[in-house]
Image (cartoon, grey):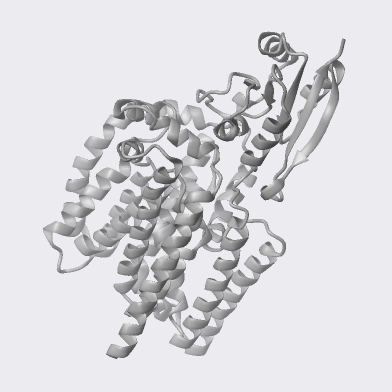
Amino acid sequence: MPTKKINKLNISVIIFFIIYLGVLLVLAKHTLTWVDELYSLHTTSQDLSFAIKESYYFEAQPPVYFGLLNLWRNFSDSLFFARLPSIIFTILAGLFIYKIFRIFSNKESSVFVMFLFLMNPFIINYSFEVRLYSLIIFFSASSTYFYYKAYLTEYKTNINICLHTAISILGVFTQYLFVFLLVAQAITLLNIKGWRKFRTFFIIHIFVALIFSVNLIFIPTQIAFNKNEALVDLVYVKDFFYTIPSLLFSSTKYLFHSIIKLGIIFSYIIWLLYFIKKKKLSLPAIFQIINPINFLLYITLVVFLSILILFLSFKLNYTSRYMAIIFPSLFVSFLFTLTLYNRKQFILWFAFLSVFYTFIDIKTYSSLVKHFDYERIAEFIENNEESNTPLVFYNGRNSIPFQYYYHGINKIVQLPIPSDYKLRSDQDYLIKDTMTLNTIFQRDLRTAKNFYYLSNKEDEMIETYLVENFLVQLDTLIFDRAKINGLRVRKLIRKK
């Protein structure tokens, strides 16, 4: 590549990172918090031993992320400061995506892939959030890179093996699912390089497994905590396979987004078929072309199937972020296929995806609200409340972030139990019967003649109870900056 072109590319990288870092810092400073972030702040609110204990018993995760966050928060206790590590891990992950892609492509394409990775809505979503996902994506990307350097090349060095082993240990003590990445790497190594290379990997990771085994005493309880016997298999499996397009093209539900996403998928398939026909490729020729990313495809497939089998077997609650561990290998594999035809077409794909990702990112964060506008709802209550007017929440996932912004004079009552950090499952947010409801109102609202009731859904039993026992003085739905997510606020007066 000519020197002038390299200099332009380097300048574009510098400009991109200045803008990117600036945008993330603004989002970290001004985006409203939500319940999962406040869980992290609670877990890391005391000393290191408390963070480790809560990571196992409350977060149901190993303690590396929460231990690091606990130490980090010794310098500052602000939400903004707590979000900074996620930004750092995200940028580091982007650099390793560049290094992985550089293995089988030129510098320019690798830089463009890094840009797209960092702009991807899934990455942006967790890039400044006080949760472990940016760290696990960084560990996944760096582990994949050092795995390749340590085991898949003929020029391995002890430093690469040591770095890969260190990341393996940190990874399995950050998220249990990281074990599946190591299993996938082992299977891939045996398949590609045979027994000799596999033996080294296996011996080293017996040591990793022995260290990890201390977690086994916690796992049965944590599996029981996440179980949901009501899950329907077909719908459940569908959610897993929807994860792939959601990771690559976002899971947001804006107007026409689903149509655009389907359009991208069909365009991609048609483009691949056109490429195969144009080049007159046989099946062996196709396998030869994708040979550079075989190890990434194996890893992605094995991890995906392992997580699918685990969650199906135990009927565990699932959300697409649990697949964060496969995102680096999935994304690099997808972008590699876009480089197959020629540079011009790759640039067109890059331009289109850049615009698409930017549109989704702007649309998502223009309001600086992830769920409900708890800050404005708290202001509304503070400006209208009177003393001895408790605030009753139907859902603890709303009462906890509301408390972060509320500085009023009344107590908060959470149905069905006090608003604290001891909620263990979604079932804990539900009222089981009218006896429980009566107990709460007698215990927490006995002296109150009126109260505010805040909810985001209507429970038939609770609504019937409220109609029978209270009159409605105020009933409003507050969206404000949330735009599409409104919290219903009612002021109720006890019937005489």
Front residue of 398 and 179: 398
Percent across and percent down for residue 196 are 16, 58
**Residue at left 45%, top 41%?**
79
Quarter of the figure that contains the C terminus: top right
Q: Tell whether 183 sits left or right of 207.
A: right
Residue at the image position 70 percent from the left and 47 percent from the top: 480
Query: Residue at coordinates 64% horizontally, 46% vertically from top-left?
Result: 235
Q: Nearer the viewer, residue 406 or 57?
A: 406
In what quadrant of the picture does the N terminus appear?
A: bottom left
**Can residue 276 be seen at all in this image of the molecule?**
no
Q: Residue 261 location, x and y as percent?
A: 63, 66
Which residue lies at the image location 67% right of the left edge and 56% below the top edge? 253
Q: Residue 250 placed where, x, y %?
A: 57, 59
Residue 139 picture location, percent across and down: 32, 52
| Residue 225 falls left or right of residue 303 | right
Name above or below for residue 205 compared with residue 476: below
Q: In the displayed structure, would residue 411 be above or below residue 375?
A: above
**Tag count in the figure?**
0
Q: Which quadrant of the figure has residue 444? A: top right
Nearer-the-camera pick, 312 or 125: 125
Could one spot residue 169 in this view of the protein?
yes
